[in-house]
Image (spheres, rainbow, N blue to C red):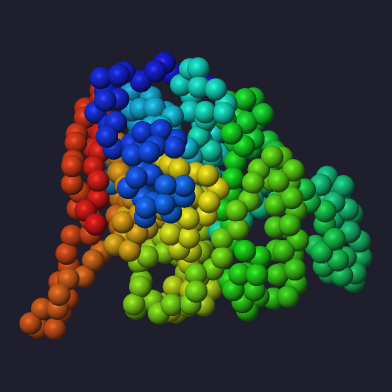
Amino acid sequence: MALFDLFPEALAATFTSYLPRTATTHHYLENNLNNNINTISKPFVTLTYASSLDSQISLAPGVQTLLSGPLTKHFTHHLRSCHAAILVGVNTAIADDPGLNCRIRHIVQDAQPRPIILDPQARWLCSWLRYSLDSVKNQHQQQDEDEKYRKIHDSQNDKSKEFYSDIKNCRLFRTAREGKGLYPWVLVREHNSRLSMSQQDPDEYENMTKRRAVAEKAFIDAGGHIIYIPDLPAVDATTNPTTTLEFNGEEDNKENNKNDEGTNTDFARNKWSWSTILSKLANQGITSLMVEGGAGVINDLLSVGNLHLVNSVIITIAPVFLGQGGVVVSPPGRAGESSENGGVTRVTAVRFKDVGWCVMESDVVMVARPVV
């Protein structure tokens, strides 16, 4: 893909105060260490995405939609050069097969941002599993045998079918092997997760475990790094309903997702804590994180319980309406005080301060800090 020159200095200066100064910025350390200069509690978090005028980032779930113009695309790579890592959710990773690198000229590989995939159920890892050709041929031969034995043969074949992972050929690994980016990390839930073990058919659970083991080994063998995140301790969803990221991985169509148990309280138990995620990344040396999507990741970080974790928000607004039915960025609503008639009033979900606007060709970029 085409490389970019350095981003225009005059435009870059507009955003400097909203970004981490360096990968080990002392400015950031001094404000986030609780008087401990050697350890950070979380990375500097910049939330950034491109949106249509009707607050949509995609025409439909899983559909890659180009919104940024040439200059704002260049700006995205400037932002990447200012961060130690880039994070996207599993649906974005599956839909886009992204490179998540910085394509500005003369950026050496060691200075590239670390690509990180948020993949709670290892769906992205397992999406690269393929059945071997011999296994498929054996299945076809078995299907041609006597009807009396066909079910038995098919059942046995399903359990013995050999598969492998082709993840080494995903764009992230190709980019790293070419020296144009760093090798990826992936965040997945621990193997003994309540979600993975609860009320599953033993054969289905065994098959899932086998597939995940193959997928994880291939990812590590190709040069990737896996960070395991524990389940959030059981909580009452009515007391802390918006502080965590849902486990089901469908971050691009959050409203339509159902968890396995179905109740609000159980739903809260099948989540991750963003504080835990960011703490894990800080422990791995990540000092600044650029979060690029998808919509569920963005909406969750903009929720009232997570907003304090976000340092800056940068939104590119394209001069287009995508129309109804697309993937919308709109954080959870907030309830205010109860009214006299017993109803509950709504209040603004998110407000911003230190707001700046910058016109970049046909697009407009808003930069701000959230009001916590």
Q: Pick the residue in front: 62 or 175.
A: 175
Q: Pick the residue in front: 54 or 9.
A: 9
Quadrant housing residue 20: top left
Q: Position of residue 342 (x, y in %)?
A: 13, 83
In this picture, residue 345 sits left or right of residue 238: left
In this picture, residue 126 sits left or right of residue 243: right
Quadrant in the picture for the C terminus: bottom left
Question: Which residue is outermost to the left?
Answer: 340
Task: Tell me what residue is drawn at x 70 percent, y 70 percent.
Answer: 205
Q: Position of residue 139 (x, y in %)?
A: 85, 55
State whether residue 182 is above or below residue 334: above
Task: Tell me what residue is drawn at x 39 percent, y 37 percent.
Answer: 25
Question: Could one spot residue 253 in this view of the protein?
Answer: no
In this picture, residue 44 sits left or right of residue 134: left
State whether residue 121 is above or below residue 171: below
Question: Could one spot residue 242 in this view of the protein?
Answer: yes
**Total number of numbered labels?**
0
Task: Tell me what residue is drawn at x 62 percent, y 31 percent.
Answer: 176
Task: Tell me what residue is drawn at x 64 percent, y 46 percent.
Answer: 225
State whether residue 109 is above or below residue 208: above
Q: Position of residue 11 (x, y in %)?
A: 26, 23
Q: Position of residue 124 (x, y in %)?
A: 60, 50
In this picture, residue 200 sits left or right of residue 144: left
